[in-house]
Image (cartoon, rainbow, N blue to C red):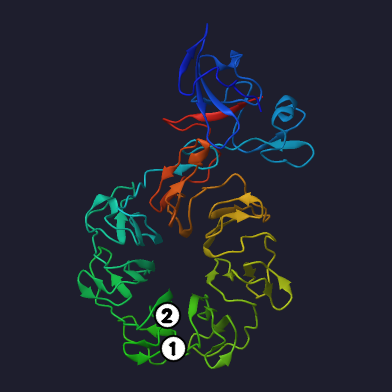
């Protein structure tokens, strides 16, 4: 790495040469100096191979490469390779090497859309995002005084352009942990709350599309971990509760459309049920910490018939608790068991696996994130995971990752967040909305990079090529 000689210039000061103004700045925890040059930097002799400069052009200047972490030829850029070597990555190990990756605020692989600029008065976690048929988006979690509105706590609705919809203002007294939209537009949520608009609602509530409180009111005596809507309008929910509406129900219950307890459905489990998913044929998959369910021995992962009886034909086994089950459009089943590594006694899968519709174990990335996965979806044949993971082996992915259709990591897509992603919502216009407990996106401030404040909500633009400029911010490039 080439250094600006010490004691010859002062960081932040401007120096004038015959044709150029030069601004020098220190970068904390990084060996190089970043030099911003006002003028024709292509002919600036002060900047040498390996130096990084800050520019704001619409295209990368000749003789420079964007600091985007990409692998480039050791032969074509031999001078740069001889200067920086493999300190930013070995490339393919023989013919390429990696450039440094220093983003400004959003650029390159980020493609942030800051039109959904949610704010809260406290560090917040949002757990669920839902889009209504008119394009408006509902976000629920632990945020308080959302969008600067005193008392707008735990839930907010945004117009399709990202502005606050002040007409939607239900008042929850504690956080919302999940929810879904019914076909009639009503909004079902669960969480730690006990009142909505001052009316008793214990952990479960249903809102009308305008945000007013619905009369639906089942009452569990302990925590809810997940819910699912059946085709007939009945709702199945799971958790750690022992009664619903004061009637014994051991961790699994179903309520009728009006919220009354379905007395014909009572499978029960011997320990907390964490997740469930309803298949197109009406059968229900359950995951959690249980060892018996519906009176049968079946550890961590089971399937029941629509009437709640045990489905003995479902023989898939796992060696650890199941935390998430998602039924995909093609009928395959995505399963997250973050502490597990074995399916059906002999098939190795670290934390994540997928079952084909015939229940055979599908091919899957051998190095998929072995941590909590909170949501998973496929778009255009690519697989998106969000959760609590920060690395995929040596690849730093920061809580969201996309795999190509061939199951290799897609290194062109990386939101690069500061905390867990709890939910991902594909919007009707192709954009992706991420919610979680991340307070920043993009950049290492300690390495001279600015980061976007997110308050737990981030909107990504529709799939598009990497961007090499950002209005109002600079681009870091390296001299070849």
Residue lying farthest to the right in this orientation: 94
Q: Which x, y percent locates residue 321?
A: 57, 76
* Residue plotted at (44% across, 31% down): 473
Quick one: label 1 or label 2, which is nearer the N terminus? 2
Q: Is residue 169 above or below residue 51?
A: below
Q: Is residue 445 above or below residue 42?
A: below
Measured in 3D between alpha carbons, the distance from the residue under mark 1 to the one under mark 2, in whole angstroms, is 13 Å
| Numbered label attached to residue 250 | 1
Q: Is residue 136 left or right of residue 272?
A: left
| Numbered label attached to residue 236 | 2
Q: Is residue 195 left or right of residue 323?
A: left
Q: Which x, y percent locates residue 273?
A: 49, 80
> Quadrant of residue 377 in the image?
bottom right
Q: Is residue 355 visible?
A: yes
> Which is nearer the eye, 317 or 263?
317
Q: Is residue 58 visible?
A: no
Q: Dot 1: what SS?
A: loop
Assign the C terminus to one quadrant of the image.
Answer: top right
Q: Is residue 132 above or below residue 340?
A: above
Q: Which x, y percent locates residue 210?
A: 25, 63
Q: Which x, y percent locates residue 242?
A: 40, 87
Q: Dot 2: what SS?
A: strand
């Amino acid at each position: 790495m080439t250094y600006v000689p010490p004691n010859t210039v002062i960081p932040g000061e401007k120096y004038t040469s015959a044709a150029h103004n030069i601004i020098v700045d220190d970068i904390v925890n990084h060996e190089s100096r970043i030099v911003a040059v006002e003028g024709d930097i292509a002919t600036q002799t002060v900047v040498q191979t390996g130096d990084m400069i800050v520019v704001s052009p619409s295209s990368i200047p000749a003789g420079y490469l964007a600091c985007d972490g990409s692998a480039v030829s050791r032969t074509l850029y031999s001078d740069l390779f001889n200067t920086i070597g493999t300190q930013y990555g070995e490339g393919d190990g023989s013919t390429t090497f990696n450039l440094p990756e220093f983003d400004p605020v959003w650029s390159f692989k980020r493609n942030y859309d800051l039109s959904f600029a949610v704010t809260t008065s406290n560090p917040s976690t949002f757990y669920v995002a839902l889009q209504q048929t008119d394009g408006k988006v509902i976000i629920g979690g632990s945020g308080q005084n959302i969008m600067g509105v005193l008392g707008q706590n735990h839930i907010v609705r945004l117009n399709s352009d990202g502005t606050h919809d002040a007409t939607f203002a239900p008042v929850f007294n504690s956080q919302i942990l999940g929810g879904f939209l019914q076909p009639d537009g009503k909004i079902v949520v669960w969480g730690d709350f006990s009142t909505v608009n001052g009316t008793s609602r214990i952990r479960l509530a249903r809102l009308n599309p305008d945000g007013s409180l619905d009369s639906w009111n089942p009452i569990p005596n302990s925590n809810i971990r997940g819910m699912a809507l059946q085709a007939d309008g009945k709702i199945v929910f799971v958790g750690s509760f022992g009664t619903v509406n004061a009637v014994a129900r051991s961790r699994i219950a179903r309520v009728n459309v009006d919220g009354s307890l379905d007395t014909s459905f009572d499978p029960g489990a011997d320990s907390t049920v964490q997740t469930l998913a309803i298949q197109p044929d009406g059968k229900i998959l359950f995951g959690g910490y249980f060892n018996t369910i519906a009176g049968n021995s079946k550890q961590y992962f089971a399937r029941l018939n629509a009437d709640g009886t045990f489905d003995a034909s479902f023989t898939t086994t796992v060696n650890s608790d199941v935390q998430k089950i998602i039924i995909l459009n093609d009928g395959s089943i995505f399963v997250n068991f973050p502490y597990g590594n074995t399916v059906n006694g002999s098939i190795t899968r670290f934390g994540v696996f997928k079952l084909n519709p015939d229940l055979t174990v599908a091919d899957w990335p051998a190095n998929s994130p072995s941590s909590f996965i909170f949501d998973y979806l496929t778009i255009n044949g690519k697989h998106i995971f969000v959760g609590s993971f920060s690395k995929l082996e040596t690849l730093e992915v920061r809580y969201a990752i996309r795999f190509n259709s061939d199951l290799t990591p897609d290194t062109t897509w990386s939101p690069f967040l500061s905390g867990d992603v709890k939910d991902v919502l594909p919007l009707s216009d192709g954009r992706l909305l991420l919610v979680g407990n991340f307070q920043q996106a993009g950049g290492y401030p300690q390495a001279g990079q600015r980061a976007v404040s997110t308050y737990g909500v981030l909107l990504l633009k529709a799939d598009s090529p990497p961007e090499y400029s950002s209005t109002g911010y600079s681009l870091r490039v390296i001299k070849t």
